[in-house]
Image: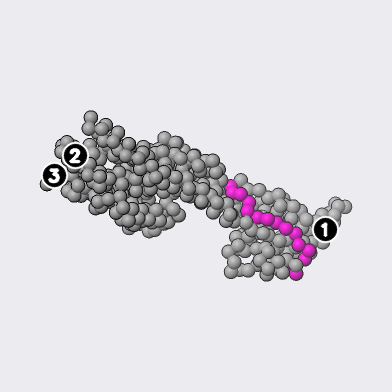
Amino acid sequence: MKIIGIILKSLKEQIRSYWVLLLSLSMGPFFIFVYFLIMETSKSQYTVLIANKDKGVLANDQMINHGNDLMAYFKNYKTDTVAFPFIVNEVENKTVGIENLKNKKADALIVIDTSFSQSLQKRKLADSTSLVNVEFIGDLSNTNYLISAVWANEIVNEYALHATNNKRIVQVKETALGTSATASSFDLIVPGILIVSLIMLMFTASIAFVSEVENKTIMRLKLSKLRVFEFLAGISFVQLLVGIVSVLLTLLTAIMLGFKYEGSLIAMIIIASLTSLSIIAFSLIIAAITNSANEVLVVGNFPMFLFMFFTGAAFPLKSDALFTIAGYPINIQGLMTPTHAISALNKTLIMNMDVSSIIPEIISIIVLTILYFMIGGIIFKQRHLKLT
């Protein structure tokens, strides 16, 4: 029954510290909104210019201009895998197009040769000696040109095959994992921001633990023969509720801004709950080495930034594995539970993988959580719960 008393007491204390609670609950939605604005204002867009010099060809008493058809094909081109990020504009001639390139008004220029239709027509009649000439012009040191050229070259080849009734020698089939084919840049950062909302528990949980020391109420708890487990369980339960509410608010904000995910909501809550417990456990270490809320706000900044920026939570981060355990890679960031939590959320929310695929991540989180609790519990007991 002592645990219930600690839970109720901790819940009241948490409500009293409403500014800290508000900070923890609002940080996730705030980051989601900021990243949404960043992604919306930095969407990749490439401008491709086409200068059509094709004179056309007479076939079956009908004038055919494949240059005009190619431009129409560009403008109507769609792909089943990703959004087509190109704007296609026609220019009068090559000179005008080059001038636009120099002034950074476009990324690539395609010049269709005067004999384009004639060459395609010969190819259609099985004349393998006929060359179809198309010129690509751009700044080869510019990434935008390289991306534009690759896409444009693929579209030109595809049109040529279609126009000459030929088939590809190699037919490539692309299969996307989960929603990765249609996932936007915003969708890909959401799992990390969900974990950011949980990392903020580092402050609320640490303050919840250390406030008992600062307010001297720890003395009454000592005299009541309260066990360490009961003390930790009571406060951890309240902080776990805060973590679940925080991650659900963050997810709801992301969905309202257009985030689409696959997988089970229950699986996400399980991952969020385990991650919350790990953050609470680490917070106990912070509380164990501090004596007041002010000290928590100072000391806690360093581990909070480590957890946010060196685990892939705030932005993607990847490093080489130091070693593997049963095929699961372990790196330096793997000593921090958010690393495994983000991996698990990516698999479930983006790749639509089942729970069995995230067992290594779950085991890693549980092992590290137990380790954090053991370290924090021992130090906290020695410094704040030991009767002298």
The CA span between labels 2 and 1 is 97 Å
Task: Residue at the far left: name it.
Answer: 388
Q: Earlier in the sequence, mark 1 or mark 3?
A: 1
Percent x, y for residue 303?
33, 55
Q: In terms of secondary structure, where does tag 1 sit? A: strand
Examine the rendering and report whether any part of residue 88 can be seen. Answer: yes
Q: Residue at x 35, y 43 (%)?
A: 17
Quadrant housing residue 103: bottom right
Tell me how many marks there are: 3
Examine the rendering and report whether any part of residue 371 can be seen. Answer: no
Percent x, y for residue 1?
23, 29
| Residue on which disc 3 sits | 387
As for residue 205 lying within the magenta part, the answer is: no
Residue sitting nearer the eye, 264 or 57 = 264
- Kindly identify the amino acid type of the residue bearing the numbered disc 1: Val
Q: Relative to 2, is 179 on the left or the right? A: right
The boundaries of the magenta stretch are 81-95
- Kindly identify the amino acid type of the residue bearing the numbered disc 3: Leu
- Categorize mark 2 by other alpha carbons within 10 Å: few (<14), some (14-19), many (20+): few
Q: Relative to 110, is 239 on the left or the right? A: left
Q: In terms of secondary structure, where does tag 3 sit? A: loop
Residue sitting nearer the eye, 233 or 388 = 388
Residue sitting nearer the eye, 379 or 159 = 379
Percent x, y for residue 285?
26, 50
| Residue on which disc 2 sits | 220
Q: Is residue 37 above or below residue 53?
A: above
The CA span between labels 3 and 2 is 11 Å
**Do the numbered discs 3 and 2 sit on residues whose CB atoms are within 8 Å?**
no
Q: Residue at x 40, y 56 (%)?
A: 309
